[in-house]
Image: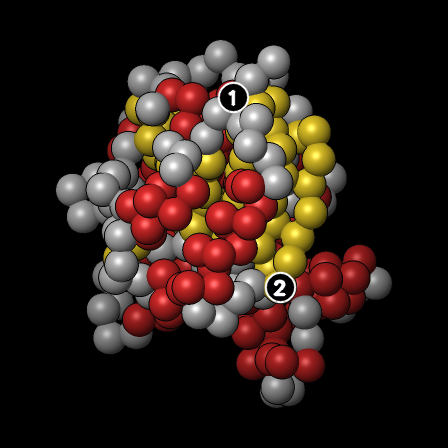
Amino acid sequence: MRKYLSFDIGGTFIKYGIVGENATIIENNKVKTPDTLDKLVNLIDEVSKGNSEVEGIAISAPGAVSDEGIIYGSSAISFIHGPNIKELIAERTGKSVYLENDANCAGYAEVWDGAAKGKKDVLVMVIGTGIGGSVIKDGKIHKGNNLHGGEFGYMLLTTDLENSDHVWSRIASTKAIVKYVAKRKQVDYETLSGEDVFELAETGDQICIDALDRFYHFLAVGIYNLQYIYDPEVILIGGGVSAREDLIDRINEKLDRILSMIDLAKVKPTIATCKFRQNANLLGAVYGYMKE
């Protein structure tokens, strides 16, 4: 069985592991994210030398990753933006290297052996502090002309252009729920978490119940828009909120209401949660490597 060395570069930790060609993680580990580019390249080189049997190196990273290996945009790891990371690592390790955006890797994991296995046209959206994701077309990542494919959170859901908080990420993310509840309760939003809002709603807190109803509504509106823009086979939802058992049912309720009010709409989006969570980026990076 062919094996690959995979890295998931995060702001706090770098996860890494050996991934088999059958979508299994044979072994994995994590270390604190280094504070310089040299230390990052050294780390990858050291791990590579200890696993000389691997076919190559696959890397998931934040930011707008170009095919050439330059990471544009910004992230919590400022030093990865600008240099050609792919070339630096290939030169140091002597291995072939695949580098891709983390959300795109998560999408590839689902296509490889997850909830989108066997499908060609898929959208994967990850809900967290914002809303991002990936666009899969004919089984491959679609990055877009400006490397912004999958930046669903930028979508406007209102014509009120005086308020930048009306983009999808700032209305329907878990952070948005917390901010909405904190404003209604007149407390500092940092004293609340998404989990707190869900728990308070279950105890009958009306503000939190209203906030979640609003959350599901705006999620459904965005998903409806995505369906008619791209017409995918399935829209997958990831992020911490995807662990909630009632998530899909609640969004479907809102979609049914939307479709009942718009007589032109005949296609209901097919939605599901992602199969993979913490190891999605490791797996997806390897799948991208194998496809390339």
The spot of residue 202 in percent (x, y) is: 80, 58
Tell me which label, 1 or 2, sits earlier in the chain.
Answer: 2
Q: Is residue 63 visible?
A: yes
Determine the image quadrant of residue 265: top left
Picture residue at 48% right of the left edge, 64% below the top: 39
Q: Residue furthest left?
A: 145
Question: Left or right of 193: which side holds 288?
Answer: left
Looking at this view, is 48 or 205 the one in front? 48
In the rendered structure, find residue 112 and report the number of the disc placed on it.
1
- Residue type for callout 1: Trp
Q: Does residue 250 appear anywhere in the picture?
A: no
Apparent side of residue 246 relative to residue 82 in the rendered image (left or right): right
> Which residue appears at 46% of the width and 36% of the height?
57
Q: Amino acid at mark 2?
A: Lys
Q: From what the image shows, is residue 218 above or below residue 279?
A: below
Observer-nearest of 287 and 189: 287
Residue 195 coordinates in the image, percent (x, y): 72, 62
The percent position of residue 171, horizontal first and vertical second, equals: 45, 62
Circle count: 2
Residue located beneath label 2 in the image? 32
Mark 1 crowd level (few <14, some 14–19, many ≥20, 10 Å Cα): many
> What residue do we see at 31% from left, 71% from top?
164
In-front residue for pair 52/189: 52
Secondary structure under the numbered disc 1 in the rendered image: helix
218 up-or-down from 167: above or below: above
